Amino acid sequence: MKTEMDFEELMDEAYGLPNGPAKLGMLEEAARVADVNGMEEEAYEARSEIVETATFCGYPMKALIAFSWQLGKFDQQPEEYDEETLMWSYKWILGKMPDFPEISREKILELLEDFGRRFKSYGYSERSYWYYRFRIFMDFGELEEAGRSYDRFRTMDRDFMSDCEACEQDEIMRYFLLKGDDEKVLEAAQPILKGRMSCAEIPHLTLSEILMPLYRLGRTAEADKHQTKGYRLIKGQNDFVQSFAEQMDYLTRTNPAKGIDVLEETLVFAADHEDPYAKMLFYARAASLLRRWVEDSPEYRLRLPASFPYEGDPGDLLKLADYFAEHAQTAAAKFDQRNGNLHVSSLIE
């Protein structure tokens, strides 16, 4: 049987690895060792690391499961654990929950209110509660309610538990994007584009998000520069599947050959991705790209990953496009059923 020594060795090795499947696997093994040996504090520590690693390397479901275990353990013995670390994890989880249509609207809002009560009880600013309420109602497609939360959180003081300014600014951009105000999107993006705001995922996300607003405003030369830089920042990273979709959406209209390169390089990440929302967008944009590409190269055979579950002919681009589109439409219908509107389906039309 593996022992406490094995746990420490596994954790030390995991800490030395970059975020990714290898590190995540090491942490999961450490949690298993802790569970088998009845090491509750160590099991909690391992799951805290799992939540962070899984959240930022494309495994949100693993993060949700680990956090659920953590929250239950914390509520049993709150004096044994650090509430600040748990509340940071809670924020990450709230940001990911709407991406899973099987999690009901009622459950998401219940957890949001639980989060808000906990934040208030610890004396933290209510800004984080209203900010995540803003994000969640955007995910639901309820923009009027999102706007009310936007107005509230913007008036409240930041504290050390607030999300970074760059992440908040990127979400503000998303709000104006959903409202269809491209000028406002680009205005909100300026502090990021000028380098005044940045973090581990910004401007990585931002540079792909602004491509279609720039395209619709006729500023394709500017968009091309951002596309090249943006793709360079996210290339080879499986946490940016939605950004790959945004890249393909733009390239379908401006440079489909380059779009096909992006599709072939990133499909392996999308096919194995745990986030159904990001995967839905990727498949929807892949379908549109293939339908555009067949006009230029009808004999082209798409290079599919060996593990990709498609049994048809990769040279029949229209049938392959239908395969991607069907997956996206099925996923969108599940989101619409959960949300009670057609918001998500409208995003992939």
Image (cartoon, rainbow, N blue to C red):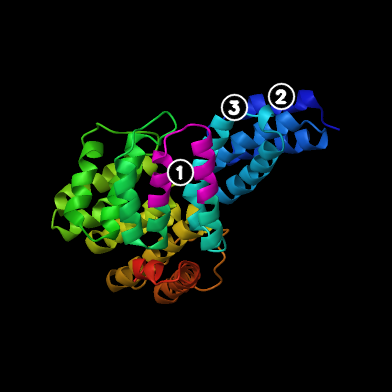
Residue 194 occupies quadrant? top left
Tell me the tag on residue 8. 2
Secondary structure at badge 2 equals helix
Tell me the tag on residue 325. none
* Residue 172 locus on image (x, y percent): 30, 47
Amino acid beneath label 3:
Tyr
Residue 84 occupies quadrant? top right
* Residue 160 locus on image (x, y percent): 42, 28
Q: Is residue 165 visible?
A: yes
Secondary structure at badge 3 equals helix
**Given contact means CB atoms under 8 Å apart, are the residues at marks 3 and 2 in contact?**
no
Secondary structure character of the magenta stretch overall: helix
Q: Quadrant of the C terminus?
A: bottom left
Tell me if residue 178 comes above or below residue 210 in the rendering. below
Left or right of 204 on screen, residue 73: right
Tell me if residue 89 comes above or below residue 16 in the rendering. below
Question: Which mark is nearer the camera, 2 or 1?
Answer: 2
Tell me the tag on residue 237. 1
Q: Which residue is mark 3?
A: 15
Amino acid beneath label 1:
Gln
Amino acid beneath label 2:
Glu
* Residue 233 locus on image (x, y percent): 35, 40
Which residues fall within the magenta stretch? 112-134
Question: Which mark is nearer the camera, 3 or 1?
Answer: 3
Q: Give whichever of discs 3 and 2 has the lower sequence position.
A: 2
Q: Give whichever of discs 2 and 1 has the lower sequence position.
A: 2
